[in-house]
Image: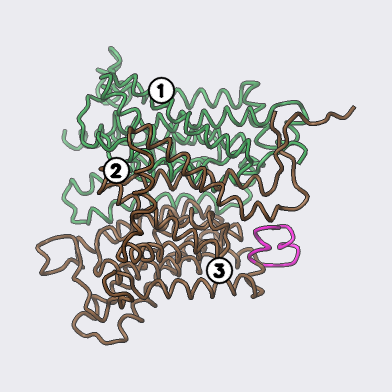
Amino acid sequence: MDGMDTALAILVGTVRAGTPLVFAAIGELIVEKSGVLNLGVEGMMLVGAVSGFIATVLTGSPYIGILVAIGAGVLLSLVFGCLTQLLLTNQVATGLALTIFGVGLSAFIGLDYVGTPITGLRPIAIPVLSSIPIIGPLLFNHDLLIYMSVGMVALVTWFLYRSRGGLILRAVGESHDAAHALGYSVVKIRFLSIMFGGGMAGLAGAYLSLVYTPQWAENMTAGRGWIALALVVFATWRPARVLIGAYLFGGITILSLHVQAHGFDVSSHLVATLPYIATIVVLVLISRDATKIRLNAPASLGRPFHPGA
Amino acid sequence: MLRLEPRQTTSVQMQYATPVIAGVLTIVAGIILFSSLGVDPIEALYTFFVKPLTSVYGLGEWALKATPLLLCAIGLSVGFRGNVWNIGAEGQLTIGAVCGGGIALAFYGDEGPWLLPLMLLCGGLGGMLYGAIPAFLKNRFNANEILTSLMLVYVSIQILGYLVHGPWRDPDGYNFPESRLFDDYGLMPVLLAGTRLHLGVIIALVLTGVIWVFMSRSFQGYKVTVAGQAPAAAAYAGYSRKRVVLISFLISGFMAGLAGITEVSGAIGQLVPVVSPGYGFAAIIVAFLGRLHPVGIVFAAFLISLMYLGGEALQINMKLPLAVTGVFQGMLLFFVLGSEVLVRYRIKIGTQAREA
């Protein structure tokens, strides 16, 4: 059945295209829940992508590549953390700086690796389950990171709403003065959140360069870091909705590829605008209800914290 | 232990000192970067910052590349002062190039001295309308302007790509994705023989003066400043937030659009798939480096322009990748933002005195 195969290919492609968005957005969600807006996701993703790729080329192991990518994301996020949390810089401007820096840095260190072939991460077929028709290839024949991304969403949901740590993190994000008065170290908690966001962004980048493509090209994230930021708003800061949103965008990306493959005479350039236009449309639809955004957004989002200031 | 103590008033000396401090720190970081790459840092820094300016042609290129940066940055600074974040200058620049360049192509073979002014006007208006989209979405639907303006950058680049690969491709161009070369009436007059320096730099400086007057002398400019520095006061005084958003985007969009059309009618001379090496993003750095002040922005535009030239010089003379420019720009912005703390806080050594 050709139609069935196509449909299946689209669905599997959707999950693969959505996974880097899941990682990046779930990381940024934690950051924003702690009251910090880090616009550097795109830059951290790129640096994660390139460093993970280089590590994989050098060691031959994509798993080491993934770890290196997470580490690189964390390192870069520390720059953002030091500036915004210790030197109290403007978060919007610092995040932008992080992206500009990350774009340049990744292009710089990745120059010799453009076009280098690697063996990316292979899918892990779960025994028995993966041989079920349709459901098997759809749910049980993916690479490790896809399983991990779903697990991470579940973990973050549990952490935020069922654990003491999550409660503290949310308190810091809602009212840093109150949290400080209760004796929690606002700066420390925000630092940890920023580092988590950096690690996840690095992982998202590694998914692109080690699994999705798998190769390194300058600026290969193509705005996915920014789409991830939009997804957090789309999800109204709730982890499970991040998953829905990410697959929605993955679906749009894959569908636009299939539109061309099936001989529709549309310019590839115009089709390539679809995910970005979709992001704008979705943002408009969600943000239209200002009260909903106000009720869901962390109240201290983007506000600097200086004890006794 | 180091700690920060808020100043009663912002330090004037530090306002002038911070860009210098940031510059020095960037050079120190550059020395470390080049040394770690096994490159002689003195030679590399000389090639990066000095060598491009040792010829008349180089000086012309310096001002040439500063032009779009200045145009974009001075426009963006209006919004940044009012806490309105237009991150999509690169997109408005691209659409400005498309609209102005479209005029040149539409009147191909039928031109006169009126062509260039019309192109500039349409380029500016095109950028302005494109910039109006995020402003409208912000005002009408509360959609975050950072994200929408940025998404529109990617859209604009694809639109330009579609046009030069498709309907606007040069019919005599051997299938290269380029438009026709504009006719002479559609090109910026060159100011200095032997260089590529064109009229655009004069336009940029004049408009910088206009925006300076607007921000420092007009009531609307004052409202923008109040909206940024004291949003509550602005709301209490009844200043419309929506109008601040709209005006910021219209001005920055117009300026970015103008930057786009001056690039294609000046340095490039036709529409190509990539009209800007990220001037619209670098302009954000320029605006902050210039502390959002017109005079500072002029200096900053020339400094960042030098970084583009320096990157090219390093690539040609020392075989270093062009991306060095981006790394330097990012570092500079980090240091500018980081040293900003000195304006508002004193650094004190020792722990805070505890109340008994």
In the image, which residues are magenta? Answer: B224-239
Observer able to see residue A46: no
> Based on the displayed image, in which of its 4 quarters is residue A265 positioned?
bottom left
Question: What's the chain of the residue with tag 1?
Answer: A
Where does label 1 land, which residue?
A: A148
Q: Which chain is assigned green? A: A
Rendered residue at 64%/63% (across/down): B241
Is residue B84 left or right of A253 when viewed as pictured? Answer: right
Badge 1 crowding class, 10 Å Cα cut-off, few under 14, some 14 to 19, many 20 or more, is some
Q: Is the C-beta separation of discs 1 and 3 under 8 Å? A: no
The color chain B is rendered in: brown
Q: Eyeballing the image, is A189 above or below B296?
A: above
Q: Residue at x 75, y 66 (%)?
A: B237
Secondary element type, mark 1: helix
Dominant secondary structure of the residues highlighted in magenta in the image: helix
Determine the image quadrant of residue B293: bottom right
Q: CA distance from mark 1 to mark 2?
A: 36 Å
Rendered position, B284 above or below A191: below
Along the viewing direction, whichever of A15 and B126 lies nearer the viewer? B126
Residue labelled with disc 2: B321
Q: In which chain is the residue bearing label 3?
A: B
**Location of residue B217 in the rendering, given as x and y in whole percent from the top left corner:** 65, 75
Q: Position of residue B200 (x, y in %)?
A: 38, 73
> Residue B24 at what x, y percent from top left?
51, 45
Q: Specify whether A28 is left or right of B81.
A: left
Residue under numbered circle 3: B247
Q: Nearer the viewer, residue B77 or A7?
A: B77
